[in-house]
Image (cartoon, helix red, strand yellow):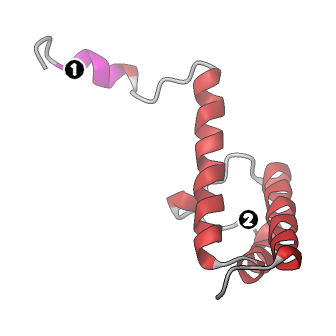
Amino acid sequence: MSFPNKEQRAKCWSSRDEYWKCLDQNSPQHSSTSGESVPNACKQMRKLFETSCPSQWVKHFDRKRTYEQFKAKMQEGYDPIPTEQKSTKSPGA
């Protein structure tokens, strides 16, 4: 696919926004990068998103949403390393 023109980009971004809105309403913690299946309520919007955007853009936007979710967790004080893992490490490791 050649680089999308202005109209195609607008359609892509709009379909992405609608898909993300559906995820936020139906499965806020859904991560497309983890291999989770798309919630049934959002499957049609996912298809539209995938057909409206170049595949590399879809990958980029999926990673972007996952990163934004992780970043929000970190700002809330999330610790990605479970406490039990920290206590089992030896002091010199």
Is residue 86 covered in magenta?
yes
Nearest the eye: 28 or 56? 56
Residue in the image at 74% along x and 83% along y: 51
The segment highlighted magenta reads 84-89
Residue 10 position (above or below residue 79): below
Q: Which residue does the image show at 66% across and 86% down from the upper left?
A: 2
Where is residue 11 drawn, in percent x and y?
Answer: 87, 74
Q: Which circle's residue, 2 or 1, is located before the other in the chain?
A: 2
Q: Nearer the viewer, residue 89 or 64?
A: 64
Q: Residue at x 58, y 72 (%)?
A: 56
Q: Is residue 91 above or below residue 65?
A: above
**Quadrant of the frame with the N terminus:** bottom right
Q: How many residues crowd mark 1 within 10 Å: few (<14), some (14–19), many (20+)?
A: few
> Which x, y percent locates residue 74?
58, 26
The CA distance from mark 2 to mark 1 is 37 Å
Residue 21 in the figure: left or right of residue 81: right
Residue receiving disc 1:
88
